[in-house]
Image (cartoon, coloured by chain):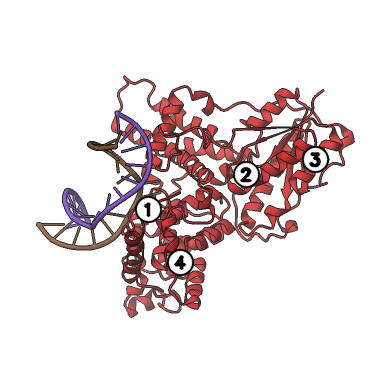
Chain colours: A red, B brown, C purple
DNA sequence: TTTTGAGTTGTTCGA
DNA sequence: GTCGAACAACTCAAA
């Protein structure tokens, strides 16, 4: 009888798991579920304690669910290639199956692991799972990868309606056989905790795991947040987003499950083309449409990083390699970066967002844009500093989406807005946190500051500062830079590059 | 090859 | 406060 190893990576679930179901099918249920704690990744510079903790949560639940079905999760630690070959030798497995990962680091690792396994005579099979359409599946008429979102989205939706339905259809969880009792000593005796791995988690984190991911997906739909998504998602004080990003990051839920949920909402609101659609339903349709767009953005950035791996460490638009970052004074730059990181810039919307990140390992997407714009356009600091800090903090930190988002904000990426369109932090604050609820939630020192001063506390007269118990300079900082001045300098630097270089990306 | 339409998420100014 | 226009010029993708 054939035995197949399923190597779990970013697919920590049993339902709608492509490689796992294929393994169960090909092996008649005789699947060895395994996860490898990769020492190289755990020692990497871009790792976040919060993300490790969340991942371990997912693994713990995966193991518990497998045990309810008579199986269990074998957890190994070390180099995946070495550990998997050893597991093959011990168990007599003939094949290793896994779901494909498209980030540069994962591609290098998977090439090494595949080669090692094949040299040992093991059959290796890989599957599409973490996206609905893979990087190579959508090409322009010229056969080139898409570099602009809107045509990409159009092609994505077209492909779906022209025979791609199956790609978006979730599949059921497989039936797995019990592992032989004689294998009881294989793998770690217990899943380590984050602190046992050397990570100190200070945040209150969402509970990881497949069931929690599915519960949140249902809640997102049933609470009406999905339908209201287009109208509410931009306000960080509102629970208007799905909060599913960590679950998608680790595959506790699949993009197909998300897409199916969004589509079911559309079909329920619009059972037929001919039904009368009042204005309220149009809003609901916009909600699901906007959320589907975000799922497509996730795949857009995955394929950008796949096709343009230089963007992983450098500017997607290489002509900006000559761009000057920083003030020219490294000490000042360090002070400014630390103020940004710690939420002490004197711009409340920025500071509230940075404290939300530090305290929860997550940040609202509108806030991510604001703080990224602030770091790159107001502090004139290299986007890579912000990108790395996000990766070291975010529970949902995904290399492709994080890189894409930062380069977009910095103006060095795809679909960059014209360089003179620079976020004004005060305007963003007034527009997207009009009641100041988000600011007050994360900046207790501003709790009693009247709303008319909340978006710019340094404008408070001395008397008001005294009345609200918030003295500028001691309780809360004055702005560390002048937005109007920094904006002009940023525009100057970018326009210089634009004059010099003929744009090219490749 | 040429043409055409469009481009996530904005800001500022002046009426 | 609200609204429309200007901001500059280029690339991408498809016809």
Q: Residues within 10 Å of mark 3 (few under 14, many from 20)?
A: many
Q: Please tell me whether residue A26 is drawn above or below residue A195 in the rendered image.
A: above
User: Dot 4 corresponds to which residue?
Assistant: A381
Q: Nearer the viewer, residue A375 or A382?
A: A382
Q: Please tell me whether residue A434 is drawn above or below residue A172 in the rendered image.
A: below
Q: Are marks 2 and 4 on the same chain?
A: yes
Give the letter of the chain under mark 4: A
Answer yes or no: is residue A208 visible: no
> Which is more foreground, mark 2 or mark 4?
2
User: Dot 2 corresponds to which residue?
Assistant: A107
Counting from the top left corner in percent of width and height, residue A180 is at 86, 31
Report the residue at 41% width, 66% height from top: A348
Q: Secondary structure at mark 4?
A: loop
Q: Earlier in the sequence, mark 2 or mark 4?
A: 2
Counting from the top left corner in percent of width and height, residue A420 is at 31, 59
Counting from the top left corner in percent of width and height, residue A139 is at 45, 34
Q: Residues within 10 Å of mark 4 (few under 14, many from 20)?
A: many
Q: Residue furthest right?
A: A182
Q: CA distance from mark 2 to mark 1?
A: 29 Å
Q: Secondary structure at mark 2?
A: helix
Contact (CB < 8 A) between labels 2 and 4?
no
Q: CA distance from mark 2 to mark 3?
A: 19 Å
> What label sits on residue A503 in the rendered view?
1
Answer yes or no: is residue A267 visible: yes
> Which is more foreground, mark 4 or mark 3?
3
User: Dot 3 corresponds to which residue?
Assistant: A85
Left or right: residue A203 compared with residue A240: right
Q: CA distance from mark 4 to mark 3?
A: 45 Å
């Amino acid at each position: 009888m054939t035995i197949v190893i399923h190597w779990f990576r970013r697919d920590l679930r049993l339902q709608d798991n492509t490689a796992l179901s294929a393994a169960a099918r090909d092996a008649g249920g005789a699947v060895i579920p395994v996860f490898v704690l990769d020492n190289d990744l755990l020692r990497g510079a871009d790792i976040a304690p919060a993300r490790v903790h969340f991942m371990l949560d997912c693994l713990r639940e995966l193991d518990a669910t497998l045990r309810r079905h008579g199986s269990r999760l074998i957890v190994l630690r070390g180099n995946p290639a070495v550990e998997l070959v050893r597991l093959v030798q011990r168990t007599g497995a003939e094949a290793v199956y896994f779901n494909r990962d498209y980030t540069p680091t994962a591609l290098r690792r998977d090439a090494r692991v595949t080669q090692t396994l094949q040299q040992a005579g093991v059959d290796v099979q890989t599957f599409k799972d973490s996206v609905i359409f893979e990087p190579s599946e959508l090409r322009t008429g010229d056969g080139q990868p898409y570099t602009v979102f809107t045509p990409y989205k159009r092609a994505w939706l077209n492909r779906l309606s022209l025979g791609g339905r199956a790609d978006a259809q979730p599949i059921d969880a497989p039936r797995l056989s019990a592992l032989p009792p004689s294998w009881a000593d294989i793998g770690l005796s217990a899943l380590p905790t984050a602190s046992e791995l050397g990570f100190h988690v200070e945040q209150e984190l969402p509970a990881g795991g497949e069931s929690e991911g599915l519960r949140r997906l249902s809640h997102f739909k049933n609470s009406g947040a999905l339908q209201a998504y287009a109208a509410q998602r931009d306000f960080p004080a509102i629970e208007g987003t799905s909060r599913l990003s960590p679950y998608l990051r680790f595959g506790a839920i699949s993009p197909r499950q998300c897409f199916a949920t969004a589509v079911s909402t559309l079909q329920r609101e619009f059972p037929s083309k001919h039904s009368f659609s009042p204005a309220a339903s149009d809003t609901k349709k916009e909600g699901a449409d906007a959320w589907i767009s975000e799922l497509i953005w996730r795949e857009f950035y995955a394929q950008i990083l796949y096709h343009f791996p230089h963007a992983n460490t450098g500017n997607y638009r290489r002509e900006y390699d000559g761009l000057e970052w920083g003030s020219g004074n490294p000490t000042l730059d360090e002070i400014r970066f630390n103020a940004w990181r710690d939420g002490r810039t004197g711009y409340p919307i920025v500071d509230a967002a940075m404290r939300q990140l530090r305290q929860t390992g997550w940040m609202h997407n509108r806030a991510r844009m604001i703080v990224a714009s602030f770091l790159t356009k107001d502090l004139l600091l290299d986007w890579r500093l912000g990108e790395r800090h996000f990766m070291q903090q975010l529970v949902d930190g995904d290399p492709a989406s994080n890189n894409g988002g930062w380069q977009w904000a910095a103006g060095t990426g795809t679909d960059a807005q014209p360089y003179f369109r620079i976020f004004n932090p005060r305007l963003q604050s007034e527009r997207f946190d009009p009641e100041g609820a988000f600011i007050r939630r994360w900046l207790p020192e501003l709790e009693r500051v009247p709303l008319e001063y909340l978006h710019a506390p340094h404008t408070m007269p001395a008397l008001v500062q005294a009345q609200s118990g918030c003295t500028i300079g001691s309780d809360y900082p004055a702005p560390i830079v002048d937005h109007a001045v920094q904006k002009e300098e940023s525009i100057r630097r970018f326009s210089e590059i634009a004059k010099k270089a003929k744009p090219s990306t490749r």
